[in-house]
Amino acid sequence: MTTTLDEAPLSREAMEAFWLPFTANRQFKANPRIFTGARGMYYSTAEGRQVMDAMAGLWCVNAGHAAPRIADAIKRQAGALDYVSSFGMSHPLAFTLATRITAMAPQGIDHIFFVNSGSEAVDTALKIARAYHQARGDGRRTRLIGRAKGYHGMGFGGLSVAGIARHRRDFGPLLGDVDHLPHTHHPEHNAFSRGRPAWGAHLADELEALCQIHDASTIAAVIVEPVTGSGGVLPPPVGYLERLREICDRHGILLIFDEVITGFGRIGAPFAANAFGVTPDIITCAKGMTNGAVPMGGVLVHRRVHDAFMEGAPEAVELMHGYTYSAHPLACAAGLAALDTYQEEGLFARCADISPVWEAAAHALQGKPHVVDIRNIGLLAAIELAPRPGAAGERGAAVLRHCIDKDILIRAAGDTLVLSPPLIISDAEIERLFGTIAEALSGLN
Ligand SMILES: Cc1ncc(COP(=O)(O)O)c(C=O)c1O
């Protein structure tokens, strides 16, 4: 069985210099997977294969690949203003994009700090949280609380609050004053929930327990993905986020939603905060912000957080933080065109409309060999398989290979199959995707 999508036009030597991220490099270079084009739901290869992208790139190409408006906007912007720093200067598109994104966020969240990735968004949010307390004369609040199974990018800040041991293992001491909430994955209580599980809101009370251990007055912020993404697609139990919000309010702790995956329509609303009706103090976003076309991220902050920084002398820099490419003109142009595309094609509403079809197709796999849990929300799904005894990850890898052989690209996190397609996926494509997975499962030992 081959897992190669294409005979690479590149020799082994030509591939040597590129050290690929999150990749088994030697294995990849022996058996490369190279795409040469993409449009809509499909990647293409040099030999003309059309491969369905059931991951929207890496949870980012929400409008489908090569959306024409976005491609045109990038081209035009590159010829008009290729670069200007945002340190003490700027350009018009940055302000327009900030206004439009904040207009989509829950009420009260009305400022955005631009960065270039999800990782930078998270590290920036954590710094803003600490600096916010500092600005208010409460500098003792430095502790950060993450959650088990959380993924917050690969900066030292994000890694410190993350909850996936294998990601943290090799990098020495991380931030010291960090603790973690437990995750919400308890198949014995909530397997095969459709959408948000009914069981598990009480797990948020663990934050109260952490307040008892650390003293709430030392805690700066709690950061969670409203729907755990890379850790295996875990929608929040009904009432869970509300409880986190209440506990944070009671103790003066900032609540950060990491919406790098859930932002920009993935669960049928601009942000998960809108969808769930829970307003955090800070939202991080990236990925779908430009439909993946140009790297960009953002940190959305509530007015009261922003305003706490605006009390000092007006000539003083309020936040000693920023990046060379913050609000890059090409990214802003892509971001505005992405928002236009989402709006014109009604993609957030489309996601909400088609998600019952998606849910039914995903849960139709219940009862297939080795399936121990199925989770879904919006256009996200995870199918969890029991690991083969003594060979964890092999079943997930086998399904992945089968799908690739059938020209469908999915993701496997160990034995959990993860799906996150562009929001333009059709009913027929949903049927083909889950049908192919069903086929793979039927033949799996
Ligand atoms: C929730 C979350 N936060 C942060 C990140 C990091 O984003 P990036 O890879 O753009 O740095 C990711 C990436 O998948 C993510 O899913």
Image: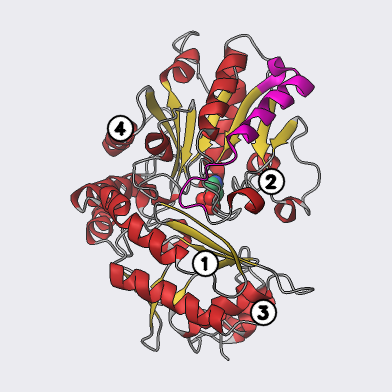
Local packing at callout 2 (Cα closer than 10 Å; few below 14, some 14-19, many 20+) is many
Residue at the left extreme, as displayed? 344
Q: Looking at the image, which residue is at 54% across and 31% down?
A: 256
**Image mark count:** 4
Magenta extent: 193-219
Is residue 205 rendered magenta in the image?
A: yes
Which residue was labeled with disc 1?
A: 366
Q: Earlier in the sequence, mark 1 or mark 3?
A: 3
Q: Nearer the viewer's eye, disc 4 or disc 3?
A: 3
Give the amino acid type for the residue marked by disc 4 in the picture: Phe
Query: Which of pointers 2 and 4 indicates the residue nearer the eye?
Result: 2
Q: Which residue is mark 2?
A: 163
How far apart, in angstroms, are the residues tagged by discs 4 and 1? 48 Å
- Badge 4 is on which residue? 95
Give SS at disc 2. Answer: loop
Residue 147, picture quadrant: top right
Q: Quadrant of the N terminus?
A: bottom right
Rounded to the nearest whole Å, what is the CA distance between mark 2 and mark 4? Answer: 35 Å
What amino acid type is highlighted by mark number 2? Answer: Gly
